[in-house]
Amino acid sequence: MSHKNIPLPERQRLRQKMIKKHNLANILTHWFNVASWLLLLSTGIAIISSPRLGITPIWWQEMFRNLFGSDANLIRFHYTIGFLWIFVILFNVLIGFRKYFVPFASHRMLLDKDDIDWMMIKPLQMLGFRKDKELPPQDAYNAGQKIYSYFVVLCTIGIMITGPVMVFKSLFPPIVKQIAQPIHFICVFVIVAWLFIHVYMGAIFPEEKEAFFSMFSGKVSAWYARAHHEKWYNQMLKEEMEWQDNVEKEVLESTHLEKTSGAD
Amino acid sequence: MATKNHYAFVIDVARCIDCRACLVACSVENNVPMDHTRIWVYDQGLQGTWPDLSRAFVPYNCMHCDNPPCTEVCVSGATYKDATSGLVLVDQEACIGCGYCVAACPYGARYIDQSRGVVDKCTACVQRLEVGLQPACVATCVGKSRLFGDLNDPTSEASLALKNAMSVTRLDYEGNGMDADPNIFYLNLPDTSSIKASDTFGQVPQSTLPRPSQYTLSEAGWKKVAIPLVAVAMGATFLAQAIFFTKQLIEGEKDFED
Ligand code: SF4
Ligand code: SF4
């Protein structure tokens, strides 16, 4: 059933009710990642200075070289932040591996048939076509977010391997370092390419406004959850109901016990 | 690139006796690892037929080119042409030892020091120039074959030697969009066609100087794969979000919930 057929009072109630989507660790990791990326991207671009490639404008290179005093300092800053980033991200993944990462990977990242249908309809709808078509229900992350996450994970691994190769330069033969450079570059900019969409969807696109605020509060309204992530919402409802049933059962049992003990 | 100083080597081939004192002096001065040298003396061998025989020894090292092909490829900016001295130097703290520059140098003047993972080459002993000394190889040359000085200063030893020279040869390299304009000026060089570069100390010379600049791997990795790929990916996603955004602006913000 479409969420569009729900009566107004019920809608209002759903909009008031907040559900937790992200835990604090997740939110902090996300914004730590954002800060690291801003620093790493700006300094990283400034490092690429080959005139033959002509990637970075000279004024940008000069600005950062003057800011840090020299090439070597700029590069040191880049990889110091880089290692901090690698450490924190890996640490968070390892610490939360059993409790958070495994469920995340198995419940929130795998694509199913609904996701594939969604991928075929949603882009057209955003452009204004096929508005009549019903979108398949989505998990906590929709298919777009899931696919994005694959790229991010792959490219992040790429960055985390090729970066240290260039820092621990005496351990690797020149050929490896020659190949590591363009791979590092590709991995970074594949993520950056997706970022255009990610940032647009998260921060500007009107329908996903709640997703943006949820990256600060960790919460989304039940209405939003139901409309955009129905499968996940139903799952949550089910768990909530089971929990209520259990509580009621326990209450029943304890009152029953009291009664029987009182009768003695 | 016009620089304040224009340091150059002037090497009189007729005066070199292949004693290789300059190699030793350089290695001592610059802590060059045992299995490498920063400078070389090429032994041309006997040329011609008896009784018209000749033999020349050609000392060479980094030519501190005016348009160095090596700085063109360095991704980290570690290799640069110094704006005041005009010397081509390597900031080894910034160098990652990838060796793009080694392939690009037409003179085989660079080597990779694998124990430190960086590239190394002749610096014209900047540390000595700063205190007013000549480079170690020049100071030690017994036959005064090697001269060094500032060509912007008409009274320097190098300028005077060039002025009085009978024949001056530059092993210029032009190709791959580069015109290197090297700053070693050879006096009395009999035949340039057979001068070969030896990559590392003791190895058999590999190719005639100057050899073509090689950009194979940097071109293949960066220019053929990385840059086009990234350009397409960024272009596509940027366009996509631009379309959504324009659409949103045109249609205005609808409250989708009601
Ligand atoms: S001789 Fe080679 S290393 Fe020296 S400046 Fe010219 S290209 Fe660079
Ligand atoms: S090896 Fe050469 S191209 Fe590579 S970083 Fe060092 S100086 Fe630059």
Image (cartoon, helix red, strand yellow):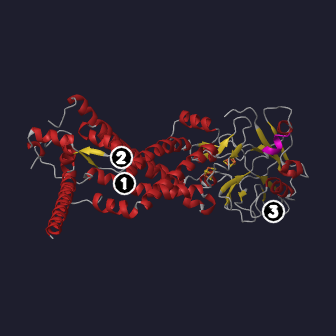
Tell me the amino acid under the disc marked 1.
Phe
Q: Is residue A21 magenta?
A: no
Instruction: Give the camera-side residue of A57 and B115.
Output: B115
Residue A34 placement: quadrant: top left
Query: Is the CB atom of the residue marked by disc 2 within 8 angstroms of ligand 2's nearest atom?
Result: no
The residue segment tinted magenta is: B126-131
Residue at numbered disc 1: A151
Horizontally, residue A58 falls left or right of residue B134, namely left
Of helix, strand and loop, which mostly describes the magenta segment? Answer: helix
Circles 2 and 1 in contact, beta carbons < 8 Å: yes
Circle 3 residues within 10 Å: few <14, some 14–19, many ≥20: few
Q: Is mark 1 on a helix, strand or loop?
A: helix
Residue A198 placement: quadrant: top left
Q: Is mark 3 on a helix, strand or loop?
A: loop
Query: How much space separates mark 2 and mark 1, taking CA atoms?
Result: 9 Å
Residue at numbered disc 2: A194
Residue A128 in percent (x, y) is at 17, 38
Residue at numbered disc 3: B46
Tell me the amino acid under the disc marked 2.
Trp
Tell me the amino acid under the disc marked 3.
Leu
